[in-house]
Amino acid sequence: MQQKHKIHKDDNVEILAGKDKGKRGTVVRVFEKNGHVRVIVGGANLVKKAIKRRSQQDAGGIAEVEAPLDISNVGLVCKKCGRPVKVGYKLDGDKKIRVCRKCGEAL
């Protein structure tokens, strides 16, 4: 069974813990690995990775790639408040929408 998460792809988030604390970026991917929900944030948590040479034209070497972060270490940034906030839900007719817990603005 796939869980629903409060942070989705293309959300604007701020990193709350780790070496890139305070950096902001957009969520590239959300996935589950070994029971833990992880997110990849564009331009953050960069690690160096050795890339193997695949063909004569394709050069190998060392590349910087974005490593996953635990979902608990990122916070969704509210457009109105401008800071990371907790996410609440409101029913809008038959739709369930995410809202900022501080100001009530739809996220």
Image (cartoon, rainbow, N blue to C red):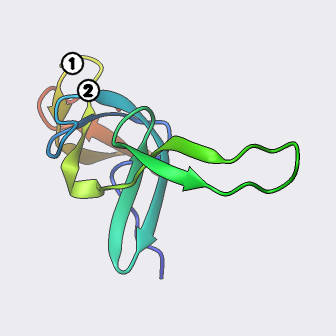
- Residue 94, x across and y down, in percent: 47, 51
The residue at which mark 1 appears reads as: 82
Identified at 20% across, 30% down, the residue is 104
Closest to the observer: 63 or 78?
Answer: 63
Which part of the image, by quadrant, shows the C terminus? top left
Mark 1: amino acid: Gly
Residue type of the residue flagged with mark 2 = Cys
Q: Is residue 5 above or below residue 14?
A: below
Q: Quadrant of residue 101?
A: top left
The answer to whether one can see residue 92 in this image is no
Mark 2 surroundings: few (<14), some (14-19) or many (≥20) residues within 10 A: many
Which label was assigned to residue 42?
none
Residue 78, numbered label: 2
Q: Quadrant of residue 46?
A: top left
Residue closer to the observer: 43 or 35? 43
**Cα–Cα gap, marks 1 and 2:** 5 Å
Nearer to me, 37 or 64: 64
| Rendered location of residue 38, percent (x, y) | 37, 60
Q: Is residue 72 visible?
A: yes
Total labels drawn: 2
Secondary structure, mark 2, is loop
Label 1 sits on a secondary structure element that is: loop
Query: Which x, y percent locates residue 65?
Result: 49, 44
Residue at coordinates 30% horizontally, 45% vertically from top-left? 90
Whether residues under marks 1 and 2 lie with C-beta atoms below 8 angstroms apart, the answer is yes
The residue at 17%/29% (across/down) is: 22
Specify few, some or many for label 1: CA neighbours under 10 Å numbering under 14, 14-19, or 20 or more: few
Q: Residue at x 15, y 26 (%)?
A: 103
Q: Is residue 87 left or right of residue 49?
A: left
